[in-house]
Image (spheres, rainbow, N blue to C red):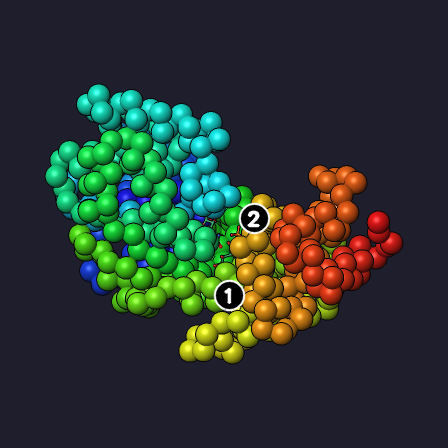
């Protein structure tokens, strides 16, 4: 397997599933970092091994994970091309963050992004001229991946599965569209090969994994005696739902309780609306209530009530058969885990995009089916309040900001009044 984006989450999730799959020794991961080489260097210094700390409310469990065979910095396109050119490379997984796809508002690669434009030009000039894809230097992750796919086309190594494990709605569809755009820019042959030989697997991934703090290495050393320079801390809970074909094979992840389903959408929406929507709400409202982490914020009465209302809105709009009562109970306990210090400022980044994807669809459905969408109004009010409280938008009004989230919702007077009420409560002062 190849993995793009060897951050904390990959090491807590896909690498863990691969280590726990049947016949674990049959599969190894060649991982590439995205922005810097630091994680690759740290992992290389310890042969790809690292400690996964499962941090439950009552204690820690330490496990050395051995599924990452090698880690390389993302700019090593030569290594990526060599790996993808081999028939035994069967799967590429990605966790490059939502921003790493460099998509515009329409969900396709943002051609106004200079890095995207440069890579489309580079591939379009170099591939038809017969240049060696391994020698190219694209700068975007998807540009590099498409150079690697061209290497695979040329070696005749056969079909391959691409698996986005990022928190994007329809992550397989967005990845397929983006790869298609880069392949089209490169050559008609590559575009045809990609549409024939590349399978996209949709996933919903779930395991709360905060950024590793430097003190984690000391905690691991104190507990195990090994000074690990690349440990990761995560919660005991884990879930992976996948839908799609793996034409060249895959690890038996179901042995580690991954679930293969026919349709991903209900599972994806359950997770994005309930978990990620609530995380976003807490990340905006929590700091205004004096909280620093998810566990602090979920203990705050206003935040907790708002999360429960958001979940009530979401649950009414989700199909049955998703075990929603149990999921909500588990979710509350996961948020309450006092030993996972999941910082709100790490979750709040790029809030506008996230509320558009995670809260607006629920609000629209609730209002269309006669609900008052109070939980959604409070979540959007939390984003508006945190934006007004920051220095980023001086002079903006509640109406302006809600209009930026969604023009139709801003025009709904009763919904807008609920948003305004949440904003005033959170800011606790008169506003324009
Ligand atoms: N951390 C979690 O709890 C969690 C849970 C579920 C899903 N995810 C998904 O995984 C993603 C990564 O999370 P993480 O905790 O590993 O983050 P991280 O910051 O530890 O790692 C992200 C990886 O992506 C690369 N990257 C980041 N931005 C990039 C960019 N603009 N271009 C190219 N590469 C880039 C980084 O270099 C790194 O290798 C999240 O954005 C989310 O979509 C995370
Ligand atoms: O940047 P985001 O909002 O997509 O994700 C931040 C966290 O909410 C997220 O990483 C969760 O911890 C994760 O999705 C749990 O499975």
Tell me what residue is drawn at x 80 percent, y 55 percent: 427
Q: Which residue is mark 2?
A: 353
Tell me what residue is drawn at x 62 percent, y 74 percent: 370
Image height check: is 298 above or below 42? below
Q: Which residue is mark 1?
A: 56
Task: Determine the secondary structure under disc 2.
Answer: helix
Task: Determine the secondary structure under disc 1.
Answer: strand
Q: Nearer the viewer, mark 2 or mark 1?
A: 2
Q: Quadrant of residue 107?
A: top left
Q: CA distance from mark 2 to mark 1?
A: 31 Å
Q: Residue furthest left?
A: 156
Of residue 71 and residue 105, the one placed in the foreground of this image is: 105
Q: Position of residue 269 (x, y in %)?
A: 47, 64
Q: Is mark 1 within 8 Å of ligand 2?
A: no
Does the residue at mark 2 contact the one at mark 1 (Cβ under 8 Å)? Answer: no
Image height check: is 77 above or below 210? above
Q: Position of residue 199 (x, y in %)?
A: 25, 51
């Amino acid at each position: 397997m190849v993995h793009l984006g060897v951050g904390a989450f990959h090491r807590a999730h896909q690498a863990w599933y691969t280590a726990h799959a049947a016949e674990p020794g049959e599969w190894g991961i060649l991982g590439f970092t995205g922005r810097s080489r630091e994680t690759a260097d740290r992992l290389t210094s310890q042969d790809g091994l690292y400690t996964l700390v499962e941090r439950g409310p009552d204690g820690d469990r330490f496990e050395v994970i051995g599924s990452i065979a090698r880690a390389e910095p993302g700019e090593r396109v030569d290594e990526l091309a060599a790996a993808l050119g081999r028939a035994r490379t069967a799967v590429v997984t990605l966790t490059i963050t939502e921003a790493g796809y460099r998509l515009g508002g329409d969900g396709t690669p943002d051609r106004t992004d200079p890095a995207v434009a440069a890579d489309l030009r580079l591939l379009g000039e170099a591939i038809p001229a017969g240049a060696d894809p391994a020698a190219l230097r694209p700068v975007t992750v998807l540009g590099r991946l498409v150079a690697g796919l061209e290497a695979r086309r040329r070696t005749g190594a056969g079909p391959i599965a691409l698996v986005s494990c990022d928190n994007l709605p329809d992550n397989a569809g967005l990845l397929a569209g983006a790869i298609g755009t880069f392949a089209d820019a490169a050559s008609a042959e590559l575009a045809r090969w990609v549409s024939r030989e590349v399978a996209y697997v949709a996933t919903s991934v779930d395991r709360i994994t905060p950024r590793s703090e430097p003190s984690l290495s000391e905690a691991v050393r104190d507990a195990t005696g090994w000074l690990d320079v690349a440990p990761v801390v995560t919660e005991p809970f884990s879930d992976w739902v996948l839908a799609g074909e793996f034409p060249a094979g895959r690890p038996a992840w179901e042995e580690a309780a991954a679930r293969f389903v026919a349709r991903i959408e209900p599972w994806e929406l359950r997770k994005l609306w309930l978990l990620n929507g609530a995380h976003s709400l807490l990340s905006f409202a929590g700091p205004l209530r004096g909280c620093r982490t998810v566990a602090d914020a979920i203990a705050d009465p206003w935040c907790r009530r708002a999360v429960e209302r958001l979940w009530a809105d979401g649950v009414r709009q989700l199909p049955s058969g998703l075990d929603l009562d149990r999921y909500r109970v588990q979710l509350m306990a996961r948020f309450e885990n006092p030993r996972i210090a999941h910082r709100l400022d790490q979750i709040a980044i790029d809030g506008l995009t996230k509320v558009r994807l995670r809260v607006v669809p629920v609000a629209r459905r609730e209002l269309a089916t006669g609900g008052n969408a109070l939980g959604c109004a409070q979540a959007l009010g939390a984003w508006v309040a945190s934006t007004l409280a920051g220095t980023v938008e001086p002079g903006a009004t509640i109406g302006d900001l809600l209009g930026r989230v969604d023009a139709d919702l801003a025009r709904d007077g009763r919904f807008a009044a609920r948003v305004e009420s949440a904003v005033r409560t959170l800011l606790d002062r008169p506003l324009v």
